[in-house]
Image: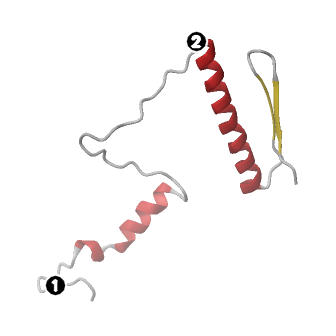
Amino acid sequence: MVGVGRSGRGNPRHSRPWRRILQYAAVGVGGRRKRKRKEGEMVREKIQIKKIDNTAARQVTFSKRRRGLFKKAAELSVLCDADVALIVFSSTGKLFEFCNSR
């Protein structure tokens, strides 16, 4: 038997391969597993969701998040073969739209 030594107990890496399979199955396809952070490693800071008071910073954030939202909508459309449409109005009232074209 693979991984069995003289003691008969076997190598723990090979004795129960189903544990590794179940570990991945519990995560799911494309799921994220938590990993331990190394000492001194930088961590992305969580932002507090509230209105941004600085007008210029608010506009920059709106533009970046709008692009990200439209990208996610396009990915959803492709991955799930779904019809997706988004309508977004900025704080100045400007209209931004997205619809998938097939």
Give the Cα distance between marks 1 and 2.
67 Å
Relative to 47, residue 16 above or below: below
Write the residue at 47% across / 55% down. Answer: 27
Q: Position of residue 83 (x, y in %)?
A: 84, 47
Number of the front mark, 1 or 2:
2
Q: Nearer the viewer, residue 56 or 51?
A: 56
Asked if residue 15 lies left or right of residue 30, the reply is left
Q: Which image quadrant for residue 61?
A: top right
**Helix, strand, or loop for circle 2?**
loop
On the image, the x and y values in percent for residue 2 come to 27, 86
Q: Quadrant of the N terminus?
A: bottom left
Residue 5, placed above or below residue 62: below
Name the residue rendered at 81%, 17% in the picture: 93
Camera-side residue: 2 or 60?
A: 60
* Circle 2 residue: 54
Residues packed near mark 2 inside 10 Å, few (<14), some (14 to 19) or many (20 plus): few
- Which of the two labelled residues, at mark 1 and mark 2, occupies the earlier sequence position? 1
Residue at the front extreme? 56
10 Å neighbourhood of mark 1: few (<14), some, or many (≥20)?
A: few
- Is residue 4 placed above or below 41 in the rendered structure? below
Mark 1: amino acid: Gly
Q: Which mark is residue 5?
A: 1
Residue 16 in picture, x, y percent from top left: 32, 73
- State the residue at coordinates (72%, 39%): 70
Q: Is residue 38 left or right of residue 43?
A: left
